[in-house]
Amino acid sequence: AQSVTQLGSHVSVSEGALVLLRCNYSSSVPPYLFWYVQYPNQGLQLLLKYTSAATLVKGINGFEAEFKKSETSFHLTKPSAHMSDAAEYFCAVSPGSTGNQFYFGTGTSLTVIP
Amino acid sequence: DADVTQTPRNRITKTGKRIMLECSQTKGHDRMYWYRQDPGLGLQLIYYSFDVKDINKGEISDGYSVSRQAQAKFSLSLESAIPNQTALYFCATSDSGGSRNEQFFGPGTRLTVL
């Protein structure tokens, strides 16, 4: 079975500070992992994805995530938060070998404090 | 023009009414999905379709039905709407032959059932 846990439903950081959003997964097969961002009143936009190539994945807007198999984690980071990063972030897992049904985490709302 | 469109964007209806939400895509993808988003619950899969003749139930299909009228069109119906179906609904698409396991989302339909 596949599932995703996002620790912290709300995260606040100061502008310019490090952003760290946590995601842990469980998967019975090698997974594909994703981070999506949802800005207010919009759909979900792909930030980055891990599909069994490099374990450190770089995405859009300066975000990156590292796949750590031993920790079953795929945490999202950005060195310096910007006001425009305020949004809802979702981690998702897909069992890569069986098609592309996704399982989403419950989301983390990021607030950036000026 | 958006690749994945949803109509309507907002809908208010009454308990017991039949509602249809429509999704169209111009991406040429074969796979389409319907999700609902509730605060604190993330996205939950309602139905998915891997091609025109293939329909599958997701995690929360009770009270919903779907129709895949063409490769580009996938509609979601609530035969008799109830208040706990008030939510944000998203359509998504993916390509089985391309960048597998990446899903592309529409802008969402906000449904309120009174």
Image (tube, rainbow, N blue to C red):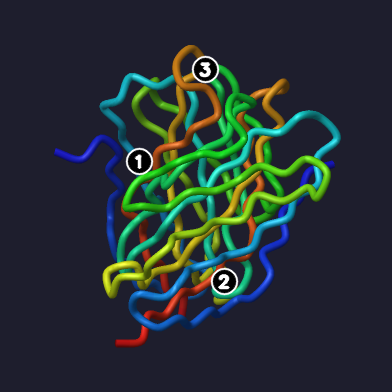
In which image quadrant can residue A55 be found? top right
Q: Secondary structure at mark 3?
A: loop
Residue of label 1: B23
Q: In which quadrant is the N terminus of chain B drawn? A: top left
- Residue B94, percent from left and from top: 46, 28
Three-letter code for the amino acid on which mark 3 is drawn = Ser
Counting residues from the start of the chain, the first of labels 2 and 3 encountered is 2
Q: Residue at x 41, y 44 (%)?
A: A46
Residue drawn at point x = 57 percent, y = 35 percent:
A50
State the image coordinates of residue B110 (x, y, percent, origin top left). 37, 66
- Look at mark 3 in the image and give the residue it sits on: B96
| Residue A65 versus residue B113 in the image, above or below | above
- Percent of width and height locating residue A4: 72, 54
Residue holding disc 2? B82
Q: Earlier in the sequence, mark 2 or mark 1?
A: 1
Marks 2 and 1 share the same chain: yes
